[in-house]
């Protein structure tokens, strides 16, 4: 289907619907045989199509309006930490806050973050948080499988596009943990933690 819409796309490029940088970039990639097949004159029909497309692009609702109508939901898992906190208005992700409070109250058991919970329970929790709901973690299903809450925390951290300790500071953290003595290691780690971006630091 990409080849079916390519002539129309190229036509829109020619009549100035896209910025000139796009035209230069795309012209380099398109085979000569395809560009030759694009009709040169702008017919009345194409003029109406361009007008319609311009109107459509300009009349798109904002992200905020889509959120208010409940059409657009913010992702929780797999979303950049800073972006997620900015969109949600929280200092710390709600998923981590809810899970850690629950674990501190009910989950002081052996291997809380080491042992894995039941996959279906983890997915159920994930879906509720992704649907912008705060699940009731005191339900029997979660009390009896406390490890699924710990597993959800690990899943959140694992899916961050930029890890909690960030790719940028990886080398510095690596050097810090390689320090000769415990005291030196502690000082170095403390120094690197101070360099984390505010969302990651919190």
Image: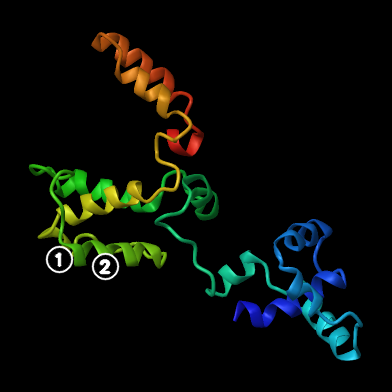
Q: To which quarter of the image does residue 118 belong?
A: bottom left
Point 34% across, 62% down: residue: 134
| Residue 66 or residue 140, whichever sits in front | 66
| Residue 105 or residue 88, whichever sits in front | 88
Q: Tell me, yes or no, if residue 61 can be seen here.
A: yes
Q: Quadrant of the C terminus?
A: top left
Q: Is residue 53 left or right of residue 62?
A: right
Q: Is label 2 in a helix, a strand or a loop?
A: helix
Q: To which quarter of the image does residue 28 belong?
A: bottom right
User: Residue 85's x, y, as percent?
Assistant: 49, 49
Residue identifier under label 1: 141
Point 10% across, 60% down: residue: 144
Q: Quadrant of the N terminus?
A: bottom right
Q: Is residue 88 left or right of residue 125?
A: right
Residue identifier under label 2: 124
Badge 2: how crowded within 10 Å, few (<14), some, or many (20+)? few
């Amino acid at each position: 289907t990409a080849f079916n819409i390519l002539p129309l796309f190229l036509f829109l490029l020619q009549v100035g619907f896209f910025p000139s940088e796009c035209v230069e970039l795309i012209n380099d990639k398109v085979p000569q045989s395809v560009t030759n097949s694009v009709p040169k004159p702008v017919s009345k029909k194409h003029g109406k199509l361009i007008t319609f497309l311009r109107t459509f692009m300009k009349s798109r609702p904002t992200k905020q309006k889509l959120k208010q109508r409940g059409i657009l939901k913010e992702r929780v898992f797999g979303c950049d930490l800073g972006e997620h906190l900015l969109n949600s208005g929280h200092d710390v992700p709600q998923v981590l806050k809810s899970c850690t409070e629950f674990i501190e109250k009910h989950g002081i058991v052996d291997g809380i973050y080491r042992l894995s919970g039941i996959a279906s329970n983890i997915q159920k929790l994930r879906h509720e948080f992704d649907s912008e709901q705060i699940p009731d973690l005191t339900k029997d299903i979660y009390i009896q499988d406390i490890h699924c809450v710990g597993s959800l925390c690990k899943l959140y951290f694992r899916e961050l596009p930029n890890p909690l300790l960030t790719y940028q500071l990886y080398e510095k953290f690596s050097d810090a943990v390689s320090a000769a003595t415990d005291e030196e290691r502690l000082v170095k780690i403390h120094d690197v933690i101070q360099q984390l971006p505010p969302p990651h630091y919190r």
